[in-house]
Amino acid sequence: MVTRFYIACVFLLFSTASVAFDKLTASVDRNPVLVGEYFTLTISADGRVSGQQPDTSALARQFVMGPINTGSSTRIINGQASSETTWQMQLMSRKAGDITIPAFTVAGKSSEPIKLKVVARSNDADEQKDIFIKTELKPSKLFVQQAGLYTVKLYLGKDLLDGQLSAPAMEDAQVTLLGKQKEDYEVVDGRRYMVISREYLLQPQKSGEYTIEPPIFNGQVRENYRRMSVSAMGKAETIDVQPVPETYNGAWLPSELVNLSEEFQPISDEVVVGTPITRTITLTALGVTKEQLPEIRLPEVDGFRSYPDESERNQLARDGRVISQLVSSYALVPQTPGTYTLPEVKLPWFNTVINRVQYATLPARTLTVIADPNQTAPAIPNMTAPSQNQQAIESTIVEVPVEKTLLDWGILLSGYVLWIFTLIFVWLGFIGRKKPAIETETNDTFKPRMSLSLLTQAAKANDKTRFYQLLSEFVTTELTTTSFSQWLKELDNAELKAEIVNLQAALYSEGTASANLEKIAKLISQIEKNQTDQKRSSLQPLY
């Protein structure tokens, strides 16, 4: 008998999942409620409902909503089983007045609407002395996209058991929590309070008059060993957001203070060709986020190669102000000697204190680039015109015909005979000494081949610094008589030139540039081979 009873219960338990319910109801746990006080809305169906839930999106226009919790239960009384499905959520109103909670519909069944009364808080209520909220916005006047610091302080005069503090809200604005909340103690009117502080970054996106909806606290405290529910609400604040001035041009940067600074390494204004210079520029601004800081674009300077590094952005809050900073580094590599001027850097920004456009500037700087003393300059042949004395001497040379005697003709003939015999002996000696000639050629090319071998070894070891030193030495001693920088400037092999530039970037900048060392060594070897072949083809035959 007992077994049959349990089987019937299990059958009824599972069969109710497919049974339609008859009634849908909605209720609140309190009415009226205070402004800023959370209350619970419960929607119930007298049956098991799966895969469906009421649409509560209409509540978002009037209430601050918590998550929906779904539950179901089954009861058996005197052999009769009954089921219930509930949906619960917490709601809170920021404004006083009479509000109607609309009807809800689930599986074709609808609930009745609820008329809710929301009562304004009394500023002189006793509970406000135990728990209250203070808010502050700095600066009090904002422009579009200007970042203000909204500070929230919750004062607790009783032992807190648990609680929930909502975030402030503002239409057409971004509100972001900065860092973590802080806990401290303060004495107000002779009473000691625990103070919970939070800082929010408030950034309006449109101009006009807006209201900052204050944060609301709901929680429980201990009083005389009893648990009590408490709540508190900050004061709403109206703010007039100013638009972007029509006369402003450029990237919009509203701030109370903007500063540009720079640092050079090495500090000297005189540098050697090929020596990298690290230029670090720092942009600091108040009242803007780090994402708003514009990238600093430096104009190109002839005679220098520039390799920008990745920028670093930072942001912090101090003394009621948001401070943002952008640090950008550049590697400047001088290519040719001379005197160069790095142009002035000028950045516009709008001063929100005096409502005027101003400019953050870096003055122009002059650098002197000198030749590398380790690189020998090519010898310049003396192409000066002959002097007047030389012209006078050359003009006095006169050819005088002389008659040849029989002895002269004999000497001349014997000379021709000796010359013919000499040619014959040279020709015979050249055939017999072909192999030593090849060995001599091998000895002449030993030095560049050995240099290429070291260059290849450095490439395989991926030693960029050693490879660049060997490359510069090989070029200046074997391929050209000019300096390495001049040879690179006149190089007509675009592929090799691009790889060498990448190698310089990898050596002199902190970016992600990379160079194919083995490819450079291969291309250099091909150039050396081509030059050798051209020299051989230009030799005149000896016979």
Image (tube, rainbow, N blue to C red):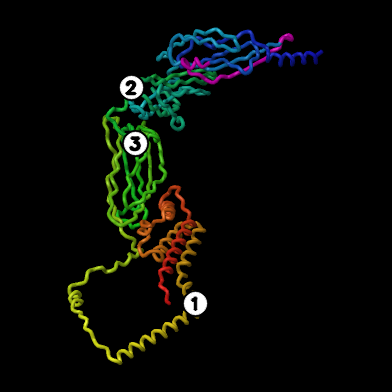
Nearer to me, 393 or 348 = 393
Residue annotated with mark 2: 240
In the rendered structure, the answer to whether residue 529 lies left or right of residue 384 reads right
Left or right: residue 339 compared with residue 11:
left
283 is higher (above) or lower (below) than 459? above
- Whether residue 274 is visible, yes or no, is no
**Disc 1 versus disc 3: distance between alpha carbons?**
79 Å
Kindly indicate the quadrant of the structure image that contains residue 358. top left
Q: Is residue 64 left or right of residue 272?
A: right
What residue is shown at x 40% (from left), y 35% (from top)?
291
Whether the magenta-drawn stretch holds residue 75 is answered as: yes
Foreground mark, 1 or 2, reads 1
Q: Residue at x 33, y 58 (%)?
A: 272
The answer to whether residue 435 shows anywhere in this view is yes
| Comes first in the chain, label 2 or label 3 | 2
* In contact (CB < 8 Å): disc 1 and disc 2: no
Taking the view exactly as shown, the residue that stands out farthest to the bottom is 407
Upstream in the sequence, badge 1 or badge 2?
2
Query: What amino acid is at disc 1?
Result: Lys
Residue matched to label 3: 285
* x then y, percent, for residue 315: 40, 36
Mark closest to the chain's N terminus, 1 or 3: 3
Residue interval drawn in magenta: 56-80
- Distance, label 2 to label 3, CA atoms, is 23 Å
The residue that disc 1 covers is 434
1 or 3: mark nearer the eye: 1
Amino acid type at image mark 3: Ala
Q: Is residue 140 above or below residue 360?
A: above
Disc 3 on helix, strand or loop? strand
Q: Position of residue 91 (x, y in %)?
A: 51, 16
- Identify the secondary structure beneath mark 2: strand
Q: Can you give x and y, in whole percent of width and height, for residue 250 in the image?
A: 31, 34
